[in-house]
Amino acid sequence: MFAAGLSLIFGVMRLVNIAHGDFIVLSAYLGLTVVASTGMHPLLALIIVVPTMAAIGYFLQRGILNQTLGDDILPPLLVTFGLSVILQNLFLAGYSADPQKMDAGALETASVSVAGLSLGILPLLTFGIAIVVIASLQYMFFCTSLGRAFRAVSDNQDIAQLMGLNKRHMFGLAMGIALGVTAIAGILLGIRTSFDPTAGSARLIFGFEAVIIGGLGNLWGTLAGGIILGVAQTIGAKIDPGWQLLSGHIAFLIVLAIRPQGLFPRVSG
Amino acid sequence: MPPILELDGLKKSFGAIVVADDLSFHLGEGEALGIIGPNGAGKTTTFNLITGALGPNAGKIRFQGSDITSHSAALRSRSGIARSFQVPQPFSGMTVFENAMVAATQAAGLSGHKAEQFALDILDKTELLSKANQTAGSLTLLDRKRLELSRALCTKPKLLLLDEIAGGLTESECTALVDTIKDVHASGVSIIWIEHVVHALLAVVDRLMVIDFGRKIAEGDPSTIMKSPEVEEIYLGIAVDA
Ligand SMILES: Nc1ncnc2c1ncn2[C@@H]1O[C@H](COP(=O)(O)OP(=O)(O)OP(=O)(O)O)[C@@H](O)[C@H]1O
Ligand SMILES: [Mg+2]
């Protein structure tokens, strides 16, 4: 889901967002703050964190990132890299370097048994939400006029402007939606594991791998990519805990070697 | 007739090449103006200036009486200026219908069922209805040109700019296209049409203008202009009619 946000930003704007990993951590910290100050359940905090992140995304895009977009891919890379550094330092200043975690109570350990297998409610919930989010994004893209507008801008920015579309506004919306989706991922992450100010970088690599395995610009592919990496990591962890991350990367390399264009390249044309 | 469009002393150069040199002309409400001129004369650039894809180095553009020189391309399209491209530029990953819908919803401001009906009516008029669900990237040249026209019409234009829309079409394809453009003109839309296929142009336009090196070198009644020495000089040795 986190990777879906990354995929969305790249798909619509051809923008590679280096700070994306830090936005997931930002969402987690925001969630933490909301939970700490109101005492509400972490999942309920989504109601506040998602719109906040979406607004941050919109204004960040309109205020800063739009200025960097052009024919050259380097300026946005540098600016988002800078953002990443700034965010990490802000987390450090605001929340200290200690790993923290959100407490979701019984939800964390609850499980159901299906056909003799015991499945955790939380992973199931995460998976369910991911499917709903990606299905809604997919519906938005292909069945609504907003989605058509996004695809038009992604296809040819100049012509889209001649159709009355303000590309700066559209980019803002895309970033808003992307960070909104990222916020959901951030909260779920914060419930599942502990995180610290630098947790974003590892997430970013993981996200990129999922996007690339799935095929650039294909949201379902991204989900599949995420699942493949997740499964590889779980299997790796069973062999030896130290193998967890490594086996994810190995899976990524294997897929790249076999299908450099990704498993499900974007269907277009 | 009050003019719908006025260009006043427009200048544009790319480095040392001057592509619009103190260019001034106007278009009456409901009028159809033809533009001819040799390759590289600055015809397409004039359209880029009118639609806002390029900003002029000097000069003013007025549309329906108000100065739009500083308006964005998006704003100009919403206020009723549409164009077709010399080289068709559809949203190639989207279907014909979706291409039309982008224009109908974003530029014409329609929504829901109304937008769909409007887009379908236009596609019917441009004979693309049977290909509505094909991806635009898979269309033939003729159909791409039709799509250019459909998408422009779906923005509900008051001013329609056509850039060599008849180029590369067969005789019968061209006739069908001319008929469609005549209908559009008859419905009250003002038109500026750049075209090398002069006989197609002459079938529609009320007035003809010749541009060379970014300057207007002749303007007036189409048949008179075609016989003028300026035009003969420019097209010297070149078959005027394709
Ligand atoms: N963006 C640009 N940058 C630099 N030069 C340009 C640009 N656009 C056009 N030109 C140059 O300006 C001149 C006029 O181009 P323009 O496309 O307006 O000609 P045209 O009259 O439409 O010709 P044609 O009949 O071949 O379509 C050409 O020499 C072209 O190379
Ligand atoms: Mg041209």
Image (spheres, coloured by chain):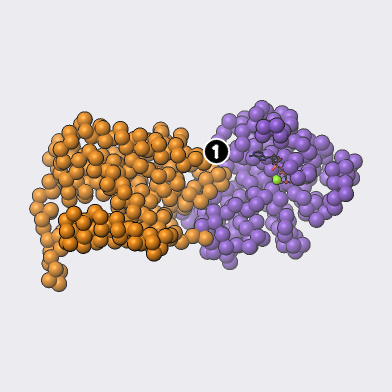
The residue at the point 43 percent across, 60 percent down is A261
Left or right, B187 with reference to A262: right
Residue A107 lies, with reference to residue B62, above or below; the image says below
Q: Where does the image place residue B39, in percent across and percent down from the top left?
A: 75, 45
In the displayed image of the protein, which residue is found farthest to the bottom? A115
Colour-to-chain, purple: B
Residue B56 occupies which quadrant of the picture? top right
Residue A218 location, x and y as percent?
40, 57
SS for dot 1: helix
Classify mark 1: residues with Cα within 10 Å, few (<14), some (14-19) or many (20+).
Answer: many
Viewer-side residue, A209 vs A139: A209
> For this view, does A185 lie left or right of residue A191?
right
The residue located at (65%, 29%) in the rendering is: B57
Q: Amino acid at mark 1?
A: Leu
The answer to whether residue A14 is visible is: yes
Does residue A139 show up?
no
Q: Position of residue B114 (x, y in %)?
A: 50, 54
User: Mark 1 highlights which residue?
Assistant: B75
Q: Is mark 1 within 8 Å of ligand 1?
A: no
Tell me: residue A133, above or below residue A80.
below
- Residue pictured at 20% horizontal, 40% vertical: A196
Q: Mark 1, chain letter?
A: B
Residue for point 59% across, 59% down: B123
Chain A rendered in what hue?
orange
Using the image, determine if residue A194 lies above or below residue A248. Answer: above
Q: Position of residue B183 (x, y in %)?
A: 70, 54
Q: Nearer the viewer, residue A170 or A164?
A: A170
Of residues B20 and A207, the one drawn nearer to the viewer in this rendering: A207
What is the count of numbered marks? 1
Q: Could you say which quadrant of the image residue A229 lies in?
A: bottom left
* Quarter of the render that holds ligand 1: top right
